[in-house]
Amino acid sequence: MKIPRPSPSEYAVRTAIVVATLAVLQYTGTFVDGPPGVDPAHLAVVAVLFPTFSYLLAVLAANVDRIPE
């Protein structure tokens, strides 16, 4: 099993971009049914789960053999 070794700063930058984008969308009320506003609990969950699932996808991609054509 191959384990990728990405740099932690890369995950930190990607996570910050995703969380900041979601915060702006929440603040402006885009894609939200209720009144606009920032939901800190939602952003905290995204900040924890996004790098976790990104890493799991990187592990999966590193261990999947390509189908020969």
Image (tube, helix red, strand yellow):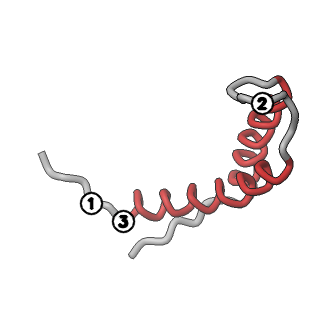
Q: CA gap, disc 2 to disc 3?
A: 42 Å
Q: Residue at the spot x=82%, y=53% of the render? A: 41
Task: Sort mark 3 into few (<14), some (14-19) or many (20+) by Cα contacts within 10 Å.
Answer: few
Q: Residue at the spot x=41%, y=62% of the render? A: 60
Q: Residue at the spot x=70%, y=45% of the render? A: 14
Callout 2, which amino acid?
Gly
Q: Which residue is tagged 1?
A: 65
Q: SS for tag 3?
A: helix
Between residues 16 and 26, which one lies in front from this camera angle? 26
Q: In the rendered image of this protein, does residue 25 appear above or below residue 13? A: above
Determine which of the numbered discs, if any, sits on residue 34 in the image: 2
Q: Position of residue 32 (x, y in %)?
A: 72, 29
Q: Position of residue 5 (x, y in %)?
A: 58, 66
Q: SS for tag 1?
A: loop
Q: In the rendered image of this protein, does residue 45 appear above or below residue 26? A: below
Q: Position of residue 57 (x, y in %)?
A: 48, 57
Between residues 42 and 14, which one lies in front from this camera angle? 42
- Reading the chain from its start, which is encountered first: label 2 or label 1? 2
Q: SS for tag 2?
A: loop
Callout 1, which amino acid?
Asp
- Reading the chain from its start, which is encountered first: label 2 or label 3? 2
Q: CA gap, disc 2 to disc 1?
A: 45 Å
Task: Sort mark 1 into few (<14), some (14-19) or many (20+) by Cα contacts within 10 Å.
Answer: few
Callout 3, which amino acid?
Asn
Q: Which residue is tagged 3?
A: 63
Which dot, 2 or 1, sits closer to the camera?
A: 2
Q: In the rendered image of this protein, does residue 2 appear above or below residue 18? A: below
CB contact under 8 Å: marks 2 and 1:
no
Split into 4 quadrants, where in the image is the C terminus?
A: top left
